[in-house]
Image (tube, rainbow, N blue to C red):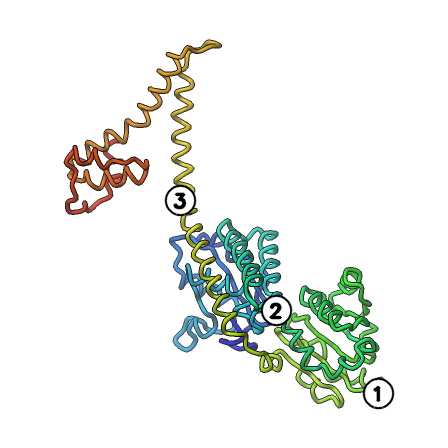
Amino acid sequence: MHHSVHGLDRVGEAARHCEGLAQRLTSRPDVRGAMVLSTCNRVEIYLDTENTANPGNVALVVVNALFPADTVGSDECPVNSRAQVLVDKGALTHMFEVASGLDSMVVGEREISGQLRRAHVVATRERTTSTDLARAVEASLHASRNVARLTGLAGTGRSVVAVALTMVQDVWQVDPGAVRALIIGTGSYAGATVAQLRGRQIEDIACYSSSGRAERFAQGHDVTPIAADQLVDALAKADLVISCRGLGAPVLNAQLVGQAMAKRQRAQTILDMALTGDVAQDTREVPNVRVVSLQDVQEQIPSAATTHLQKAHALVAQAVNDTFTEIEARRMDPVVVALREHIWHILDEEIARLPHREQMTREDAASALHHFASRLAHVPSVNARLAAARGSDYEYVRALHAVMGIDLAEAAVEADVKPRKMASYCPLADLREETA
């Protein structure tokens, strides 16, 4: 779900139902890994599913979990009315574009890559990730670093809170050292907000958390913690309030802000940067209070340079192709392991046949190696003759070349192996039954 497609209200509604979703999804037999990414303008569920999984069915389960009050899947409420569903390379491309800031409200912003990384840390801690999902996330973060290094997007792309602060620069630009700021929330976005404020020389920063995390956050970011019974006084002192809590229910309303403003003689600006809205709508009616929401910020975001975007998309496309190829190749890992185990099993049996004495002669070693080689060549040799008898010699030669890497061109000419009508069965799979 993305703000530009489904709107911030829908994104906020989905964000309220993300808790525990990854665990519920990975309990399904057709889902190997799941990761939830929820930010100020998107909710995305990344899944690694079994090859036998039906993407439409899995998507329906996800969307119903995010919108339990809707009848998703009916004619009146199709899945695509609530979410965009991407599979295979399309899903991988989207992840890379998200990591690189190409799908952000502010194109080129770098905060999203950190949010993606933290989302995967959570998935790892909750044991809902998978090998392929981890590989995709790591590759996408590597691609995002390349985009930042090799294009100009990192220099022009600003975070959402940076754009918001620019919109209200009349509050802090004249004398930032005299500005008092109050941050509501202690998550990763609150940490980024502290950095943005200090980047503008605003140092008088306090923080409040309704969940009691203000003390710990304050220690880690060198700001002033605000207790619950101090919130009204802190609001009264703050010139700039930035709320990025996003827990689904407003923390500021007209009554609370009105009490604070009764103690204050100057105007106040509130930036509501929470996805689900931390500031009740009636707060806008309080005299001398200006509220700036995410929707307001979205309208002020500038466009990125076309040349930077083109280069970034090219870098992402190449990285996606490389990663998709690697993931597809890795699907054969179990086959490779089985092949190696088969060879090692034969080797162990040959070692057990060796003479039980401390020293071996050259002839003993040569005999053992010849016997080992003969056993490896036995089944392919038998199957070669069976393939010829079945009229699938050409397919078999091609398969043997692919598997063993042997140049069989001259041998094929000598054996009069020529292309015929392709067999209607896989010679390797079919012959296995007869040689078992």
Q: Is residue 371 above or below residue 196?
A: above
Which sits earlier in the primary sequence, circle 1 or circle 2? 2
Q: Which residue is mark 1?
A: 265
Q: Which residue is mark 3?
A: 332
- The residue drawn where x is 79% and y is 80% is 239
Query: Mark 1 and mark 3 in contact (Cβ < 8 Å)?
Result: no
Q: Give 389 or 34, whichever is nearer the viewer.
A: 389
Tag 1's secondary structure?
A: loop
Which sits earlier in the primary sequence, circle 2 or circle 3? 2
Disc assigned to residue 71: none
Separation of residues labelled 3 and 1 (CA atoms): 70 Å
Separation of residues labelled 2 and 3 (CA atoms): 41 Å
Q: Position of residue 318 (x, y in %)?
A: 45, 59
Q: Position of residue 213 (x, y in %)?
A: 75, 63
Dot 2 amino acid type: Gly
Residue 3 can be seen, yes or no: yes
Dot 1 amino acid type: Gln
Residue 12 can be seen, yes or no: no
Query: Mark 2 and mark 1 in contact (Cβ < 8 Å)?
Result: no
- The residue drawn where x is 39% and y is 76% is 75
Q: Is residue 5 left or right of residue 203?
A: left
Q: Is residue 325 left or right of residue 306?
A: left
Q: Position of residue 163 (x, y in %)?
A: 65, 77
Separation of residues labelled 1 and 2 (CA atoms): 39 Å
Q: Position of residue 234 (x, y in %)?
A: 82, 76
Q: Which residue is mark 2?
A: 155
Tag 2's secondary structure?
A: helix
Q: Give 379 or 314, whichever is nearer the viewer.
A: 314
- The residue drawn where x is 82% and y is 72% is 204
Structural crowding at the residue carrying mark 1, measured as other residues with C-alpha within 10 Å and reported as few (<14), some (14–19) or many (≥20): few
Q: Quadrant of the C terminus?
A: top left
Dot 3 amino acid type: Met
